[in-house]
Image (cartoon, rainbow, N blue to C red):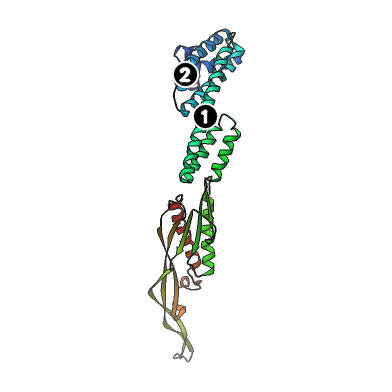
């Protein structure tokens, strides 16, 4: 056990030696060297050596990071600009950490980064402002809400680094007011009041699919919508099946006494036995329910791109009951005193409605 602990201790020393700031720097692992040297300096360990490692590591990091920054800044797409700004932030964070341990001034580097960062932010903002205006112009031309949605997304991006001007913010509000697509769902076709209420309650959960650019309501048609979605329940088909097996049981029971007199005149009573028979008919009752819905979509605008569809669901339930006949005294106790089992049709219809709803939302949402 002592040898095992000793080996672990030696291994840790080797790992620590290999991962020292100086070793990391010599291996070209400048980020590791920077972090390790900073940690050691905070603990005042080997101060001069770690100070040199910290400064030299940062010099290498700064040179490579700035090359990445310029390459990204020179590109003509906002994703690259965002990456450049992220790179700049990383450089500035490291500068803030090294300043207490370095005599080198980084003011010029920070000024340069700040200057180009501000230019990038302006380019980024302008790019998305123009993109939003173009999308809004398309909306004005064809009145497709997807274009208004694109405008909102673009203006939101423009808001990332700069506060929007009054003009752009007003355009965003206008685009947002015209970007929502409305679905209205009407559930019908069920005569039974209880089941009708249950179906409306379950399908009412579809309102939870409302989002930034989609508003879903569940109500009888009347309110305006881009898509009127009629969920028409068909006839609830029920099929019943009954099968049975019969098992008979025999049992001998005492049925009185027979009295006789022996040769000495003594009265003798002898039990009389008889065989009784009872039967158990095990009846299995099976019910199958089939239900379907037809979904018809009426497109009120070009922003409704849904189509008609049908869904079906089936469920089967079975119960078993014992019917006794004959002399029940011959029948084992396990078959007696059984509570009559019945199929819960309400549970079955509830499951059907749930399954049809799940199919509906998977298809349309």
The picture places residue 136, in percent across and down from the top left corner, at 50, 40
Q: Which residue is mark 1?
A: 126
Relative depth, front residue between 48 and 46: 48
Q: Which mark is residue 193?
A: none
In the figure, 176 relative to 248: above or below?
A: above
Question: In which quadrant of the rendered view does residue 45 lie?
Answer: top right
The picture places residue 225, in percent across and down from the top left corner, at 51, 55
Badge 2 crowding class, 10 Å Cα cut-off, few under 14, some 14 to 19, many 20 or more, is: few
Q: Which residue is mark 2?
A: 70
Relative depth, front residue between 37 and 326: 37
The residue tagged with tag 2: helix, strand or loop? helix
Q: CA distance from mark 2 to mark 1?
A: 20 Å
Question: In which quadrant of the rendered view does residue 37 lie?
Answer: top right
Question: In which quadrant of the rendered view does residue 289 lie?
Answer: bottom left
Q: Residue at x 60, y 11 (%)?
A: 101
In the figure, 103 relative to 2: above or below?
A: above
Q: Count the numbered circles shown.
A: 2
The picture places residue 107, in percent across and down from the top left corner, at 59, 13
Badge 2 or badge 1: first in the primary sequence: 2
The residue tagged with tag 1: helix, strand or loop? helix
Q: Is residue 58 visible?
A: yes
- Residues under numbered marks 2 and 1 in contact, where contact means CB atoms less than 8 Å apart: no
């Amino acid at each position: 056990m002592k040898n095992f602990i000793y080996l672990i201790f030696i291994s840790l020393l080797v790992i620590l030696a290999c991962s020292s700031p100086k070793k990391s720097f010599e291996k070209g692992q400048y980020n590791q060297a920077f972090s390790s040297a900073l940690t050691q300096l905070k603990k005042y360990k080997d101060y001069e050596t770690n100070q040199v490692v910290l400064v030299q590591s940062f010099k290498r990091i700064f040179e490579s990071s700035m090359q990445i920054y310029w390459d990204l800044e020179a590109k003509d797409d906002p994703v690259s600009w965002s990456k450049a700004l992220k790179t700049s932030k990383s450089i500035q964070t490291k500068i803030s950490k090294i300043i207490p341990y370095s005599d080198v001034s980084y003011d010029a580097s920070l000024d340069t980064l700040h200057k180009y960062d501000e230019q990038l932010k302006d380019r980024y903002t302008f790019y998305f402002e123009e993109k939003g205006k173009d999308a809004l112009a398309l909306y004005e031309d064809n009145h497709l809400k997807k274009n208004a949605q694109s405008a909102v997304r673009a203006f939101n991006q423009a808001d990332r680094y700069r506060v929007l001007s009054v003009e752009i913010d007003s355009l965003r509000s206008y685009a947002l007011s015209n970007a929502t697509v409305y679905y209205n769902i009407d559930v019908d076709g069920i005569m039974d009041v209880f089941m009708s209420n249950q179906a409306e309650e379950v399908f009412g959960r579809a309102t939870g699919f409302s989002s930034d650019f989609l508003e879903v309501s569940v109500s009888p048609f009347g309110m305006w919508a881009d898509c009127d979605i009629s969920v028409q329940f068909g006839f609830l088909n029920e099929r019943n099946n009954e099968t049975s097996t019969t098992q008979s049981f025999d049992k001998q029971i005492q049925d009185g006494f027979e009295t006789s007199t022996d040769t000495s005149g003594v009265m003798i009573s002898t039990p009389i036995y008889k065989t009784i028979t009872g039967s158990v008919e095990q009846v299995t009752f099976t019910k199958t329910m089939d239900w379907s819905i037809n979904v018809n979509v009426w497109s009120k605008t070009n922003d409704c791109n849904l189509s008609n569809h049908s869904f079906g669901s089936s469920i089967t339930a079975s119960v078993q009951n014992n019917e006794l006949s004959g002399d029940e005294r011959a029948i084992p106790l396990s078959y007696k005193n059984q509570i009559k089992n019945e199929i819960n049709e309400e549970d079955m219809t509830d499951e059907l409605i749930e399954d049809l709803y799940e199919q509906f939302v998977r298809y349309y949402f």
